[in-house]
Image: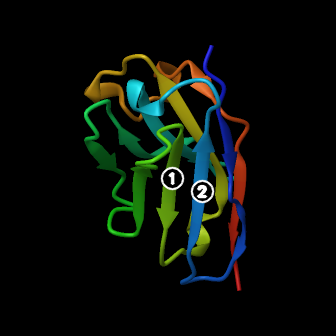
Amino acid sequence: QVQLAESGGGSVRPGGSRTLACTTSAYELSDYYMAWFRQAPGKEREGVVSIDRDGRTTYSDSVKGRFTVSLNPKNKNVLYLQMKNLKPEDTAMYYCAADDWVPYSSHFQGDRYDYWGQGTQVSVSS
């Protein structure tokens, strides 16, 4: 059983930056297929970025060029999501997810991931 915990959420002004962290205490996250999802009030959950076990990343068009996912090279139990130039439409609950295997064609399908964190809220407003 993989346990995930997100942190780093909070309030930020448009154009600002925020870095989220996804931490697990028991496993190296590089052994799993990982993804960040988000869900805004009244909207469906959407995939933000996925990273496979080879480190290949895929970003949604809405965040490409602004968000960056990375594993802590020293502590591979932490997955970061660095968010820059934040916009009000980035306001959402952000979740990290993991699974032993997710085909690329399904990398933004939430039901393909067995393990989820509790989420961390990001609010972007002036």
Q: Is residue 110 above or below residue 94?
A: above
**Mark number for residue 20?**
2
Mark 2: which secondary structure? strand
Which residue is painted at 71% across and 50% down in the image?
A: 120
Task: Identify the residue position indicated by label 1 in the image.
Answer: 80
| Badge 2 amino acid | Leu
Q: How many marks?
A: 2
Rendering coords of residue 76 (x, y %): 47, 39
Q: Residue furthest front?
A: 74
Which residue is painted at 33% across and 68% down in the image?
A: 65
For the question of whether residue 41 can be seen, the reply is no
| Badge 1 amino acid | Tyr
Q: Is residue 83 above or below residue 72?
A: below
Q: Give 96 or 77, whichever is nearer the viewer.
A: 77
Rendering coords of residue 60 (x, y %): 36, 52
Q: Give 25 or 109, whichever is nearer the viewer.
A: 25
For the question of whether residue 6 can be seen, the reply is yes
In the picture, the quarter occupied by the N terminus is top right
Earlier residue among tags 1 and 2: 2
In the picture, the quarter occupied by the C terminus is bottom right
Which residue is painted at 30% across and 45% down in the image?
A: 57
